[in-house]
Image (cartoon, grey):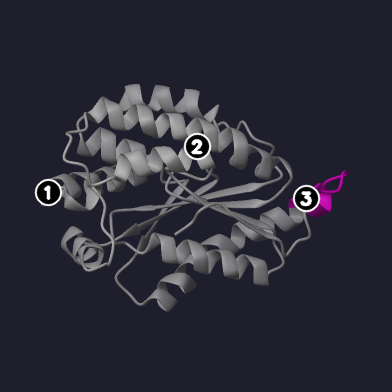
Amino acid sequence: MTRHHQSPRGLFITLEGIEGCGKSTQARLLGEYLRRQGHSTVETREPGGTPLAEKIRAALLDRTDEPVAAETEAFLVFAARRQHVAQVIEPALARGAIVLCDRFSDSTLAYQGYGRGLDVPMLERLNRLATHAVTPHLTLLFDLPVTTGLARRRSASETNRLDRESLRFHRKVRAGFLDLAKHHSQRVRIVSARPSQERVARAVARIVSPMLNRLARQDADSPAPRMKPPRTAQVRHALR
């Protein structure tokens, strides 16, 4: 059984996928949808989400000529995640907000584990330390062929160090995401990223709606009122 360290009053949704899958756009659209439903949202990303974690992100993604060891990548990601969870995610969940996070633990397992070849059980242990066992209630995995995603990313005005990785590396990452979805089928929902943004957004809304209904029932059954900002509030933490 998945253990949630955080208060059960909030809702933690992560968005995952390969480069160019459109998850950042879908995070924005989902945030807009949730606020139209009257929910308070915190929209954030990894690596990043706090001033310190954003500095780590810049170091990780910088297009430097210096080789970066796989272990260095992993340690930097976990350092940023610990700060992010402590400063942003846990407080938001404790006050009952819906947290949308563009990448989280599954990206570490897919990129540094399946992609780089680091030991996945070791990464999972380090992740539990970094997150204090905070686990998403729902993960949306946006899937499409690697060649399609990379074509989207490499046509963008800005690219980063990961965008320049080999096709073989990115195929390993995609396979990793799909394997994680198979092993965590109750939490991870695969969403095809091939259709238009609007069709993908509608598919996301269909997946999220039942969780919102459960959240509403939980509110109604709770003897104590939620301590949170007005229900239409939005807090953004450095999303692209």
Secondary structure under badge 2?
Answer: helix
Q: Residue at x 60, y 41 (%)?
A: 89
Q: Which residue is mark 1?
A: 166
Q: Which residue is mark 3?
A: 228
Front in this rendered view, residue 99 or 86: 86
- Disc 3 residue type (three-letter): Lys
Please provide percent x and percent y for residue 115.
Answer: 21, 39
Going by the picture, which residue comes out furthest to the right? 223
Apparent side of residue 91 relative to residue 209 in the rendered image (left or right): right
Please provide percent x and percent y for residue 222.
Answer: 83, 46
**Are the residues at dot 3 and dot 1 in contact (C-beta closer than 8 Å)?**
no
Q: Which callout, 3 or 1, points at the residue further toward the start of the chain?
A: 1
| Residue 29 appears in view | yes
Please provide percent x and percent y for residue 130.
Answer: 48, 27
How far is mark 3 from mark 1, CA to CA?
A: 45 Å
Residue range corresponding to the magenta coloring: 218-227
Q: Which residue is mark 2?
A: 52
Q: Which callout, 1 or 2, points at the residue further toward the start of the chain?
A: 2
Secondary structure under badge 3?
Answer: loop
Front in this rendered view, residue 91 or 1: 91
Front in this rendered view, residue 38 or 55: 55
Q: Residue at x 12, y 52 (%)?
A: 167
When asked about the image quadrant of residue 154, the answer is bottom left
| Residue 1 appears in view | no
- Disc 1 residue type (three-letter): Ser
